[in-house]
């Protein structure tokens, strides 16, 4: 059985996003879909002494209401310096910040030279997967032919990738037509985000819904122990 998941790319997403990647054999970035404003495509949250802080990549979106994610262009490069400065300031005292500081500094230097949001998200996703010990193949929906119909397109992508099992995010229950997957010979399952254990955090009350960077800086190579994908030793 080959397991496939399909999600739009997010910027430095939370641990649940990486769990979906780690639980399948191929992860397809659905970035030829419409870019949505005030969403996770270009922003995420970190914990700071002053509470949760949004880190947002500025993009060109005015008048481009229907542009796909993979055609969304970033505005300037100053955002990368600002984000890295905010991360350093908030996590300098985290137990494993020094462990990952060189990797993250290099990532932000590379990201500052990229012009497209999808490229930036892909860069962080692949490098953070490596740090977590996730070896899942990551591809693009544009690598495959696209069918008509919301659910039909997802089922066809799974089959085109040679898959017969689809792991969906739970929010998709609102629109997925189960019978389409059944007729395509694809088993459909939904990710369950319940039951995550807490881990030590800086800056006030515990919260799960922050960037994976928080978990890495706080727990280091033990990060997978607080996640759900099959555990392999993370990079030290």
Image (cartoon, rainbow, N blue to C red):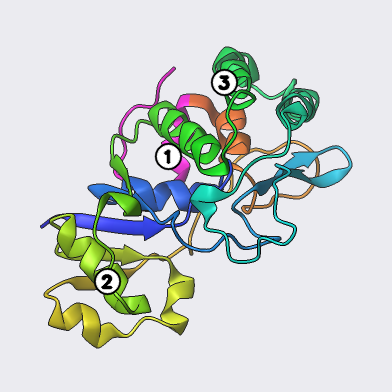
Q: Point out residue 7 in the picture as x, y percentages from the top left corner.
A: 42, 58
| Mark with earlier residue (3, 1) | 3
Q: Quadrant of residue 108?
A: top right
SS for tag 3?
helix
Residue holding disc 1:
225
From the image, which quarter does the C terminus lie in?
Answer: top left
Q: The N terminus appears in which quarter of the rendering?
A: bottom left
- Residue 182 placement (x, y as % from top left): 17, 81
- Look at 80% across and 24% down and name the residue there: 89
Extreme-front residue of the structure = 63
User: Does 107 sit above or below residue 132?
Assistant: above
Q: Left or right: where does residue 89 sit relative to residue 210?
A: right
Q: What residue does disc 2 label?
A: 147
Q: CA distance from mark 2 to mark 1?
A: 38 Å
Between 140 and 145, the one nearer to me in the picture = 145
Residue 24 in the image: above or below residue 48: below
Residue 88 shows up from this direction? yes
- Nearer to the camera, 138 or 204: 138
Residue at (56% x, 39% y) in the render: 116
10 Å crowding of disc 2: few (<14), some (14-19), many (20+): few
Task: State if disc 1 and disc 2 touch (CB < 8 Å).
Answer: no
Image height of 1 relative to 45, above or below:
below
Task: Report which residue position mark 3 lands on.
Answer: 110
Helix, strand or loop status at disc 2? loop
Tag shown at residue 216: none
């Amino acid at each position: 059985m080959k397991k496939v998941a399909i999600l739009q790319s997010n910027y430095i997403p939370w641990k649940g996003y990486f769990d979906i990647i780690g639980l399948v054999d191929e992860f397809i970035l659905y970035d030829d879909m419409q870019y949505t404003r005030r969403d996770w495509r270009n922003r995420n949250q970190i914990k700071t002494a002053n509470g949760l802080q949004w880190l947002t990549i500025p993009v060109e979106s005015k008048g481009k209401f229907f542009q796909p994610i993979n055609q969304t262009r970033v505005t300037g490069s100053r955002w990368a310096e600002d984000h890295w400065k905010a991360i350093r300031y908030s996590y300098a005292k985290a137990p494993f910040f020094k462990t990952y500081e060189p990797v993250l500094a290099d990532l932000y230097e590379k990201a500052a030279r990229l012009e497209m949001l999808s490229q930036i998200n892909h860069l962080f996703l692949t490098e953070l997967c490596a740090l977590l010990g996730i070896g899942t193949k990551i591809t693009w929906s544009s690598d495959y032919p696209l069918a008509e119909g919301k659910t039909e397109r997802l089922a066809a992508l799974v089959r085109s990738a040679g898959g017969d099992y689809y792991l969906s995010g739970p929010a998709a229950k609102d629109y997925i037509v189960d019978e389409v997957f059944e007729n395509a010979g694809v088993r459909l399952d939904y990710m369950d985000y319940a039951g995550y254990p807490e881990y030590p955090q800086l800056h006030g009350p515990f919260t799960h819904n922050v960037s994976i960077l928080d978990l890495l800086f706080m727990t280091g190579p033990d990060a997978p122990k607080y996640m759900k994908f099959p555990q392999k030793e993370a990079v030290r």
